[in-house]
Image (tube, rainbow, N blue to C red):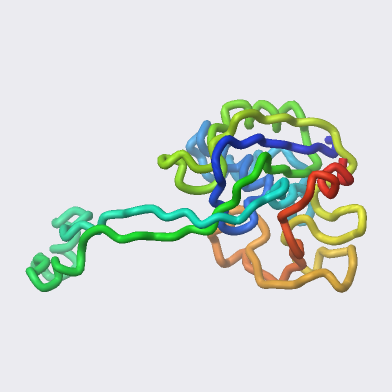
Amino acid sequence: MENIVVRAELVAPVIVQGWLTLDALLASQLFERTGDVAKAHADIPLTCSHGLWSGSAALFENAKPVQVQLVAGLRAQHDIDPALVARMRGNVIQTIGAKRRREFGNILSQYPAREVRAVWWFGQGDSDAVRSLLDDLKFIGKKHAQGYGEVASIDVDVAQCDGVQDRASYPLRPVPVALWHGKKDAVRDAETWRPAYFDLNGRALCVVPEFVDRSVSELEALL
């Protein structure tokens, strides 16, 4: 195990909600290959201590905030098996009336995004295994079908930072207060801090990064 840096160059703005930690990124790649959720969460090639993976949140190089507008269609029809509806409602399948249909149609949604040259992660783990998992990474973040977060190239190299805290002893990812040994004045918030990140049962009071948009010089200081 060694301290590493992952740098993904992008050719399109990226839409990221949440911290998008390195362990979450690697777990998603493992799931793509295995289809096994338990294996994807257990076989991440990073150091893990007390359930905390040594992988930073996504750090954005010279980020410029932008707003993305996307059109989506709401359809006036059932999108589940009518037989299931029948069982749930006593064999009565309710139709969508004309009044309700008028509420459907196209809607305009806005998403906060970033224009960045690259996204960085720091961590501690098996660099060869990390490189292998990320070799076929094509997109980062949300709205892949619309081309957002498209990856041009991935580099994995050695670094000084372990992905948990920076050189000033501030957090680079959510860390439960009970496991934190860095600066006491770090920003705190309630966060999920381990996979699966969508599971609110893993939510706890954590120290978190104060910001994830960094200059090139700030990022290079962690190498």
Give whichever of 70, 210 is nearer the camera. Answer: 70
Give whichever of 182, 111 is nearer the camera. Answer: 111
* Quadrant in the picture for residue 93: bottom left
Give whichever of 20, 61 is nearer the camera. Answer: 61
Left or right: 23 as drawn, with respect to 200: right
Residue 79, position as x, y percentages in the image: 22, 54
* Quadrant in the picture for residue 178: bottom right
* Quadrant in the picture for residue 152: top right
Q: Is residue 42 above or below residue 69?
A: above
Give the quarter of the figure containing the N terminus.
top right
Q: Is residue 208 above or below residue 40?
A: below
Residue 41, position as x, y percentages in the image: 61, 46
Q: Is residue 214 above or below residue 202?
A: above
Left or right: 36 as drawn, with respect to 102: right
Give whichever of 217, 74 is nearer the camera. Answer: 217
Left or right: 69 as drawn, with respect to 134: left
